[in-house]
Each structure stands twice: as C-alpha cells, then as structure tokens.
Amino acid sequence: MSRKAAVIGVGNTTYTSAKRDTRERSELGAACVASALDFVGRGLSIEDIDAVYFASVDAFEGVQRPETSMDCFGQSFNKPTFSVHTGGTAGGSAFKEAYHSVKSGLFDIVIVYGACTTGATVEAQQILNSASPPLIEKPFGIGAIHMAAYYLMRYKLENNISDDDFAIVASKSHKHAVNNPYAHIRKGYTKEEILASPIVCSPIRLYEICPVSSGATCIVIANEDKAKELSDTPVWIKAADSITDTYLSGYREYKDFNKLKILAKRVYDKVGIKNPLEDIDYAELFNPFSAFEYVAYEALGFCDAGEAPRLVREGITDLGGKLPCTLSGGTLCTNAGISASVSRHAETALQLMGKVEGGRQVENARIGLAHSWGGNLGQFHTLAVLSR
C-alpha cells in the first residue's frame, strides 16, 4: 500500500577543509545523526530508526564500505544500513530510495546520511578521473574541471554569455554562504573579486570552483502517521526520481543537460507543475562550478536557452525574487562530496519548514525542488519535489 512520506528532521555538522579536518569519520557521523534526532526532538532516538541509507563513494573515503567502521547508525539495535553509490549523486539517490522504502510501507522512519569525502585520500582528482573512459580522457590527464570547461565554453559561445555573467552567479552563491553557519567558504566574494581570480581552465576561474570540504548532512524521513506525531512542520515528498546516461563522456556534445530536461518533465508531470518559474517557490541546485546553475535553470524550464543570466541580473533567483535558488551557497561553497547532494534536499526542506538560519529564509515557501548530479558531468541526475 502506497503511503505518504515526509522529511521531519535535518542534521548538519560544520564544514572545513578535507585536508585539515582532524575529526574522525565516526565522530562526524555521530554528531550529524545526533543533530538530526535533536532537531526532531520529542524523545526520538536512534533506537526508533528502522534503517539508514548511507550515501558514499568508497574510493573517495579511502576505505571499502566505510559505513561498517561507523557505530552511529544503530548497529547495536540490529538496524539495517543500505549503501548507495551513484557518484556525486549518491545523496540524491539515497534520498529517493529512502523515500520509496517509507512510501511502500517497508519502514516507518529512516535516516539518509551523506558522508564527508576525500579526507583519507592522497589526491582526489586521481579518483575523479577514474570515472572517465581511459581511452579518451586518461592519456591527456583530463579531469572534472576540464570537462566542465567544455560545457561552459560551448554555453558561453553559443549564447553570447560573458565572463561578467559567469561572475554574477558565482557572487550570488558566495554572498549567501556568508549567512550559512554550516558553509565551508564564507568569504562573500564580489563579482569584481571573482573576475580578478585566476583562470584555472577557460572559462572557469578559481572562485567559480568548489572547494574540497569535510562534513556531513543527514535527513530523517517518516511515514504520515509518524510525521504528524513527531513534527509540527513536516515537509511532504511529492516525487523523487532519477535518470542515468552512459559514462562515455567523450562522445557527448557537451552542450546542455539534456537528460535533466527529460527527468524534469517526468517529475513535473507527476506533481502537476505546469510553469516551473511560477509553481516552484524555492530550488536548491547542484553547482560545483557556479555557471552550471545557468545550465540547470534552462534544463529545468525556468527560462529559455541563453536567458539564465537575465534571471540572476533581475534578481529573480535571489532572495526576495520569484524563484530563489541555492541560497545556501550551494556546492560551490561547500563540497563534501556526497554530503553535498544530501544537502540540496536538506536545505530545501529547511526552507519549506521556515527554519533556515542566517537571514536566508524565503517567505511563505510551499513548493521546493532539490537537484543533484554526478558521475561524468551529468551522467546521473536526481530531482525531488517537496511540499508543505
């Protein structure tokens, strides 16, 4: 029997540099889970949780099956832990699987947990490159930043986008990250400072690239009865879905997120969204390279091709605009790997609950959209629609 499911709790740790973080993996997990349970309150404990959906990439962690080394997920109470791995999208995929487990009646209350990544590895870029087909990318040392540059250079040339356009969307994220107490980079870089930062791989500048962060996020999902019992502000999950492309990125056009367009239509049809710009009140988008927020705007139907910079220039996607987007600072300012895709859903839920800290709260937000992507530059996409 299909049931309703809702987000009732969110847990976060602070974020810092993965190379400088002295916290143990189990310490981060215990702090994050405790934070989520405290958020719910009302006596909820780990003993009451039916299962944990653990999102991670083993290679990033430097440990095979890292969840087995953590004792914070109720193992002492014989609670099952499900490991979900779809690259950077693992947090969105775990959210989807957790939602389906509650909606189907398999479990009543579950936790989705996103691990910090890369802290135990020598060089994360070597691992990121392992996602690429070796005959195409490996001989040339091509990595995630290079492939992102392919997309954004083509986007820039085909749509007459300027470096100034790229800088303003980055500055929007940096501005709001200052007011996010959990963000890693809280410098508040201005458009001018971003334009003055060095080009890493044209057209991408240093301050338009995410950091390598360490930290954790988790979400508590409950069925309808438990949600009403435990929360005064449950956020109902209306839909959660995903799409997968081939990993053979060398044969792509590097033009847009065409698979995200397909997924968006599928999800919008499920929940009755006809005009995304009018029907959605808040969106958290996965933006490890800031200008990918533009690519997502267009794939998600917020505007036509080439018009995304106008949305930012006119304040439409800023606080107080028609459709505020990624007011957490996004992945651009905090990128603890898999945790970053869990955070998109957590931040969306907090906005709809009205419990965002730091002066970033959107007034009367009722419908939210959470997006994540990963693998080889959009190999995987997930979307979830949440509602108060």
Image (tube, rainbow, N blue to C red):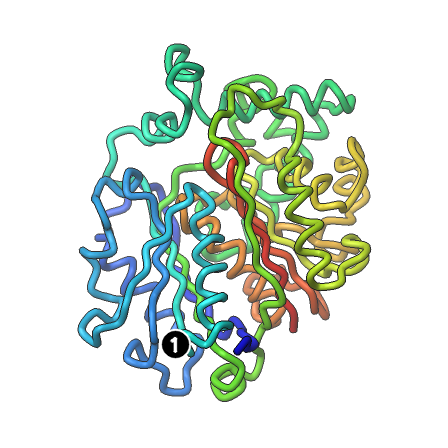
Residue at left 40%, top 71%? 110
Question: Which of the 4 image quarters holds residue 290?
Answer: top right
- Residue 387 vertical placement versus 60 (above, below): below
Q: Quadrant of the C terminus?
A: bottom right
Q: Which residue is at a point 62% across and 67% down the rendered structure image?
A: 238
Q: Would residue 171 appear left or right of 125 to someone viewing this image? A: right
Q: Secondary structure at mark 1?
A: helix
Please say whether residue 20 is visible from this viewpoint.
no
Counting every numbered tag in the picture gives 1
Q: Is residue 385 left or right of residue 18?
A: right
**Residue extending farthest top:** 139
Q: Where residue 265 sits: x, y (%)?
A: 71, 50
356 and 195: which is toward the camera: 356
How crowded pointer 1 is (Cα within 10 Å; few <14, some 14-19, many 20+) is rated as some
> In this picture, is 238 found above or below 175?
below
Q: Residue at x 78, y 31 (%)?
A: 306
Q: Which residue is mark 1?
A: 38
- Observer able to see residue 34: yes
Front in this rendered view, residue 176 or 110: 110
Place of residue 137 in the rendered image (x, y in percent of width and height, measured from the top left): 43, 17
Q: Position of residue 46 (x, y in %)?
A: 30, 76
Residue 70 position within the rendered picture, expressed as x and y whole percent measured from the top left: 21, 59
160 w.r.t. 12: above or below:
above
Question: Tag 1: residue type?
Answer: Asp
Q: Which residue: 33% across, 30% down?
A: 127
> Hey, which quadrant is residue 165 in on the image?
top right
Q: In the visual, does 29 lie left or right of 12?
A: left
As displayed, is residue 279 above or below residue 122?
Answer: below
